[in-house]
């Protein structure tokens, strides 16, 4: 494959392998917002995407799908266990989400993380043309910027961090804290979801590495003397609103929303949660608060049904296995205590659903509950808002999400405060239509104006400025 001017590096390729009934294999583009955001850029500038195809021990040659050149990076089953499920999802993920679950520190996981990051860096170095640009994504690949710069000093390198960056007191736990900071500082621009994340990162850099920092620019010493500027600031990610708006306007999807309501026994209010089954999402807290409202008679199952979609996630990591047990026990208890023959308290779905069904659920939901204990951004909050063309519906939003910085007109909650969460749910359930409209209009304005294309252009503009300054 010829070298590309612009290469995206992410843990996953933007495609899923599909095996048909007769055993035939093919690839389907995954519907993620990142692909949608980057697609125009990839086509304009001759781009490629390096990442893992999602299955261990699969050795694939580069291929092309819908005009996007894909460069598969092979992971063995040991790599998946140690680099992906281990260091990325059982060390970095819990540490960066404020140790909601205890991070595991294992030296062999770290070794695998270094080894696999090097493989990604080598794949990118091979794919990109002279003086080209590479955009690295997320916490699985924090060492790639530096490894890549060592291989290819001619490149412009961006890195975007999709999850929170923790306060220094927590970050300092990481046995490899200096190496990770150095890895990230290989980039020219490091993007975070919130201003707070960028501040925490800069604090860690100042305290650990003692580099000089002015506003959001770090002066990173270079071998042989002098320094290189690295910009670290926030670029809040968003969604591609168009498919959500279009699906929400489709009569068959609106009919499906009505059917969902009917199927739940026509409650006055439908509450909805949509999350990967993850301990960061505050699903347990939400269920507890809802259960107490039923116990106290502030809500009844005739009036209210809570639908929780918990899509299966990281099912081989212990903390996720325990979380599933806890949630399912809590749901079964509440339903056992409150269900009637005609009404259920919580309709719990441990399943993934097609996007059409998700939009029908968003349309059916009078109240959307986003109660994450920590979340980089939370796209579900933005998706819900994008579908509410009639300006009805209430978003209950945790202040510990990146989205809370932007979606100011949501009903804000601290999900750790169960009484506060219960009051917020009641406020949302009882909110008059006029106030729903006032808030939703403002939320929609924000989401529709700052979509994912605005996000990627802001990031790439910042990267372009660094490149221009370098000459
Ligand atoms: C990370 C950060 C940050 C979920 N279940 C189904 C389904 N989904 C879709 C949602 C949404 C996406 O998955 C989840 O995005 P979130 O932002 O809510 O959360 P994470 O997966 O944790 O994402 C997060 C994000 O990266 C982007 O930077 O916002 O903070 O943690 O789009 O709709 N989609 C379908 N069926 C499901 O069952 N079709």
Image: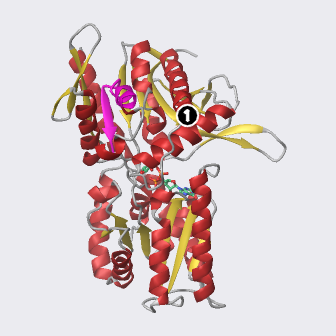
Q: Tell me: 195 left or right of 336.
A: left
Tell me if I can see residue 60 in this picture.
yes
Tell me if I can see residue 14 in this picture.
no
Q: Which percent across, then down, holds residue 177?
A: 37, 33
Q: How many marks?
A: 1
Q: Is residue 188 magenta?
A: yes
Q: Tell me: 433 left or right of 355.
A: left
The residue tagged 1 is: 109
- Considering the numbered disc 1 on the image, is that residue within a helix, a strand or a loop? helix
Observer-nearest of 422 and 23: 422
Q: Residue shown at 22%/32% (left/top)?
A: 206
Q: Residue furthest top?
A: 224
Q: Which percent across, then down, holds residue 326?
A: 58, 67
Q: Which quadrant of the rendered structure holds the N terminus?
A: top right
- Seen in the picture, residue 1 relative to 32 is either above or below; the reply is above
Q: Quadrant of residue 429?
A: bottom left
């Amino acid at each position: 494959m010829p070298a590309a001017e612009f290469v995206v590096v992410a843990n996953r390729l933007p495609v899923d392998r599909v095996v048909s009934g007769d055993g035939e294999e093919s690839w389907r583009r995954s519907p993620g917002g990142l692909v949608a955001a980057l697609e125009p850029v990839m086509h304009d500038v001759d781009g490629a995407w390096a990442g893992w195809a999602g299955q261990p021990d699969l050795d694939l040659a580069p291929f092309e799908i819908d005009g996007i050149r894909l460069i598969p990076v092979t992971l063995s089953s040991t790599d998946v266990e140690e680099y992906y499920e281990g260091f990325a999802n059982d060390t970095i993920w819990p540490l960066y989400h404020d140790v909601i679950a205890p991070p595991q520190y294992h030296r062999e996981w770290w070794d695998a993380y270094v080894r696999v990051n090097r493989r990604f860096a080598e794949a990118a170095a091979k794919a990109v043309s002279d003086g080209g640009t590479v955009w690295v994504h997320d916490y699985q690949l924090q060492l790639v910027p530096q490894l890549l710069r060592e291989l290819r000093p001619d490149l412009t390198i961006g890195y975007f961090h999709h999850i929170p960056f923790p306060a220094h007191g927590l970050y300092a736990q990481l046995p490899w804290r200096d190496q990770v900071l150095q890895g990230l500082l290989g980039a020219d621009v490091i993007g975070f979801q919130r201003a707070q994340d960028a501040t925490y990162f800069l604090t860690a850099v100042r305290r650990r590495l003692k580099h000089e920092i002015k506003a959001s620019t770090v002066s990173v010493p270079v071998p042989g003397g002098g320094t290189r500027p690295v910009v670290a600031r926030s670029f809040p990610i968003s969604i591609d609103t168009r498919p959500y708006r279009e699906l929400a306007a489709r009569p068959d999807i609106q009919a499906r929303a009505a059917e969902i309501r009917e199927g739940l026994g026509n409650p006055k209010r439908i509450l909805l949660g949509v999350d990967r089954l993850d301990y960061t999402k505050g699903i347990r807290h939400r269920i507890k608060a809802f259960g107490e409202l039923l116990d106290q008679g502030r809500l009844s199952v005739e009036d209210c049904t809570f639908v929780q979609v918990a899509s299966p996630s990281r099912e081989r990591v212990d903390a996720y296995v325990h979380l599933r047990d806890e949630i399912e026990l809590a749901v079964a208890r509440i339903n056992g205590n409150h269900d009637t023959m005609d009404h259920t308290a919580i309709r719990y779905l441990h399943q993934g659903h097609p996007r059409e069904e998700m939009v029908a659920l968003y349309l059916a939901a009078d109240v959307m509950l986003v109660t994450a204990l920590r979340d980089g951004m939370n796209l579900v909050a933005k998706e819900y808002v994008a579908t509410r063309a009639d300006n009805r519906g209430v978003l209950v939003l945790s202040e510990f999400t990146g989205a809370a910085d932007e979606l100011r007109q949501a009903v804000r909650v601290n999900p750790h405060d169960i009484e506060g969460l219960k009051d917020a749910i009641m406020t949302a359930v009882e909110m008059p239509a006029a106030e729903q409209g006032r808030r939703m209009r403002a939320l929609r304005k924000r989401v529709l104006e700052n979509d994912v294309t605005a996000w990627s252009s802001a990031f790439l503009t910042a990267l372009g400025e660094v490149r221009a300054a370098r000459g």
